[in-house]
Amino acid sequence: MSHTLKADDLQATVTRILEAAGSSPAEAQQVAANLVLANLSGHDSHGVGMLPRYVDAVAEGGLKPNAAVRVNLDIGTLMNLDGQHGYGQIVGVQAMELGIARAKQHGSCIFTLAHAHHLGRIGHFAEMATAQGLVAMHFVNVLSRPVVAPWGGGDGRFGTNPCCIGIPLAGAEPFVLDYATSRVAQGKMRVAHNKGERVPDGYLIDESGAPTNDPGVVVVPQGNGLFGALMTFGEHKGYGMAVACELLGGALTGGGTWHRPADTARTVLNGMLTVLIDPMRLGTQKSFDEEAREFVGWLRQSPPGQGFEEVQIAGEPERKARAARRKDGIWVDDATWGEIVAAGAKVGVQVS
């Protein structure tokens, strides 16, 4: 049986489990709020379904509760930061707060963040920047079991390596483009598998490199102990972007890239390169606001294509989902809820 829960009730449950796993009350509340916001935004792949993995990662020692971001290098507009295996929802926010302050002071800031545990929905960080009138660009790699095949390859060699761009729009909600470089996020395959769903053609290959519609091939080991893999979006183009994210988010940050056999660890580490720009300090604020408004308006004047009601820009589907799910509640499938209940039991929290 599935569960539909109000956001506040779900957040309270997640907070209890995180506290029992070792987080301070403030940290538990912040991480829980971030996870629930992902669900509200329609991104269940980055929501409370990640909690069981977090609990396991703490037990493994790969996720360190109550860790804070460390500054390794600071030369004003360029910073090298280390997440010290802390919750990405904590150290990522701390890194963004440092970067935003520098961008407002100097007009721009570039920072690298290494060794952060799972950062969650990268769009959250872009929204932090756009709320301050800043343009943000994020390039992220994933250090965990490789789940995405290179273009022309037959097994997983890297992660879903997201890219995100946030652009403030005067008098309107921001443009927030947040996407995995795979055809679909790994977490969405976990959700589909738990729901017993099949996925469209072109998303996956099985453990032998053959096309498949079964999301389970990237969620649970197959008969030979191996996993399948996700495909990149846009064929060679998405593959190229994924490699760029690995090199920028992993190699350049100092956090490292994936180049070893897969393991069964539950820890997920991210590296992130972030670029922040203040249009006001750049001297183009007026023309930027005018041109952005005119261009978005021009897009919206396009007549809807077949099967569409209107032209949208990135960020709008998430905002609509938030409004709907705050009203109607957050639906959690039975398998995911069972995993959350089991995670609570591991740390002595009873979830009904």
Image: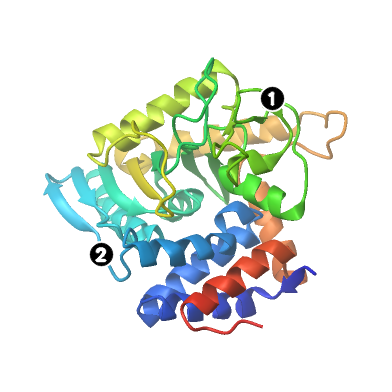
Give the residue at x 19% y 57%.
70
The type of residue carrying mark 1 is: Pro
Q: Residue visible at 59% across and 40% down?
A: 218
Dividing the picture into quadrants, the one containing residue 91 is bottom left
- Disc 2 marks which residue? 68
Quick one: 313 or 257, which is closer to the camera? 257
Q: Is residue 85 left or right of residue 73?
A: right
Disc 2 marks a residue whose amino acid type is Ala
Residue 332 visible to an observer of this rendering = no
Residue nearest the viewer, comparing 78 with 182: 182
Q: Which residue is mark 1?
A: 211
Residue 98 image offset from top left, x and y in percent: 26, 56
Asked if residue 58 is positioned above or below residue 346 in the image, the reply reads above
The mark closer to the camera, 2 or 1, is: 1
The residue sitting at 45% across, 75% down in the picture is 18
Q: Say what secondary structure mark 2 lies in.
A: loop
- CB contact under 8 Å: marks 2 and 1: no
Residue drawn 63% across the image and 80% down it: 9
